[in-house]
Image: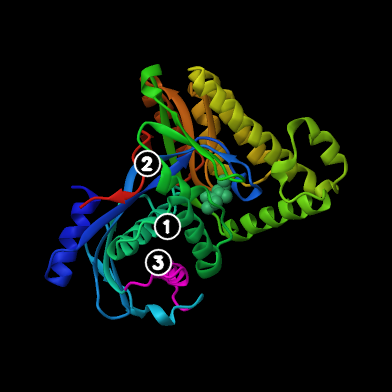
Amino acid sequence: MSQAARAAGAFERLHGRAPAGVWSAPGRVNLIGEHTDYNGGFVLPFALPHRTAVAASPRSDDVLTVSTLHDNDRAETADPVQIASLEPGSVSGWAAYPSGVAWILREQGFSQGADLVVAGNVPAGAGLSSSHSLECATALALLGLLGASPSRSDIAKWIQHAENDYVGAPTGLLDQTASLCCTESHVLFLDVRSGESDQVPFDAARHELEVLVIDTRASHSHTESGYGDRRRGCERAAELLGLSSLREVELSGLDAALSALPEELRPLVRHVVTENNRVLETVALLRADKYAGIGPQLSASHASLRDDYRVSCDELDVAAESAESAGALGARMVGGGFGGSAIALVHADGRAEVEAAVTAAFAARSFTAPRMFTAVPSAGAGQDR
Ligand code: GLA
């Protein structure tokens, strides 16, 4: 059953009537371009088939109610909130995501009381943007009830604002843009500085290749502080270089930039500048139909995130290394790091071997067993019914 059908069914059970509409939004993986978004750089995500759906009906008062379905279909309902009284910090836990969206939409002049029922299958805590898929589906639902359709890039910026200022996570634009703007069979080539984007066809199956997602199921406690520290380090480096962001450092000017910076900031800058270049190389390879050439770009990205940016962890390193030893063309961690998921570009007929090798490597180190699935670029957010 689709998540939209699950959300609609649960809405009827809880509210005794059909919802006015159902909207859903996907999780994402990023093929390459990590920790570049908040530096004004390039990213190349695609949408997962896994989605979060929000069934919604308007209310005549200013109240927002949100219920969410657990895996066993048990519904959990958050305390109702008055939209007019929402302020950063007023709601915590999972309900902070939908109420943060209601808050930012109110700030933009779109206030709509509503009953929302959420159902989803984006793995939580796996670095695959389950929370962003909830935020994006909530935003489309509340705007849809109002009959409003602002641009997707505006909605993405508002959601980033809600995430930064309401939920309190200093994240960039990658995840919500991916969820809102990706399309089936494509990766989204986004230039965060200019806001320009291009849908680049991505059909690994035609090359008998697959993108295997490896959810390490690891989550380390320094995730949030580690992310914020890196981000502040990049901003400090840009400031010392007299630039508005690290995007302005070209690969050809990297050495000069590094020599002008204190030692501790150099690895951060080296990662960001070389990673932007790897995104451009990967796009060129895809456009030239040279898919196998992407493998080394993925591996170089992982090494840079591990050694220079220092956001990997043992589980992600073991996932990438064991996948490559078993024949993957390349592998890398995805998302913020310190746990979550990795991806590996594998030959379709070698996938089982890679999966077995990763599973064995995790067992040998007594890590929690990883979960793996093949990811196919899927549709972005939209209205289901
Ligand atoms: C997280 C953030 C994104 C991005 C990635 C790293 O997923 O939400 O904005 O910074 O980490 O690329």
Location of residue 22 (image quadrant): bottom left
Amino acid type at mark 2: Leu
Mark 2: few/some/many CA within 10 Å (<14, 14-19, 20+): many
Amino acid type at mark 3: Trp
Location of residue 21 (image quadrant): bottom left
Can you tell which mark lies on residue 48? 2
Can you tell which mark lies on residue 131? 1
Give the SS element for disc 3: helix
Location of residue 359 (image quadrant): top left
* Above/below status of 211 relative to 181: above
Tell me if residue 103 is in the magenta stretch: yes
* Above/below status of 235 relative to 362: below
Give the image location of residue 284, x and y in percent: 56, 23
Give the SS element for disc 1: helix
Give the SS element for disc 2: strand
Give the image location of residue 143, x and y in percent: 34, 62
Q: In this view of the protein, which residue sits in the foreground, 376 or 37?
A: 37
Q: Residue at x 12, y 71 (%)?
A: 16
> For the stretch drawn in magenta, what is the main secondary structure?
helix
Report the span colored magenta: 90-112
Q: Which residue is mark 3?
A: 94
Mark 1: few/some/many CA within 10 Å (<14, 14-19, 20+): many
Q: Residue at x 36, y 22 (%)?
A: 205
Tell me if residue 20 is in the magenta stretch: no
Give the image location of residue 354, x and y in percent: 43, 27
Give the mark, 3 or 1, whose residue is nearer the N terminus: 3
Q: In this view of the protein, which residue sits in the foreground, 185 or 211?
A: 185
Can you tell which mark lies on residue 14? none
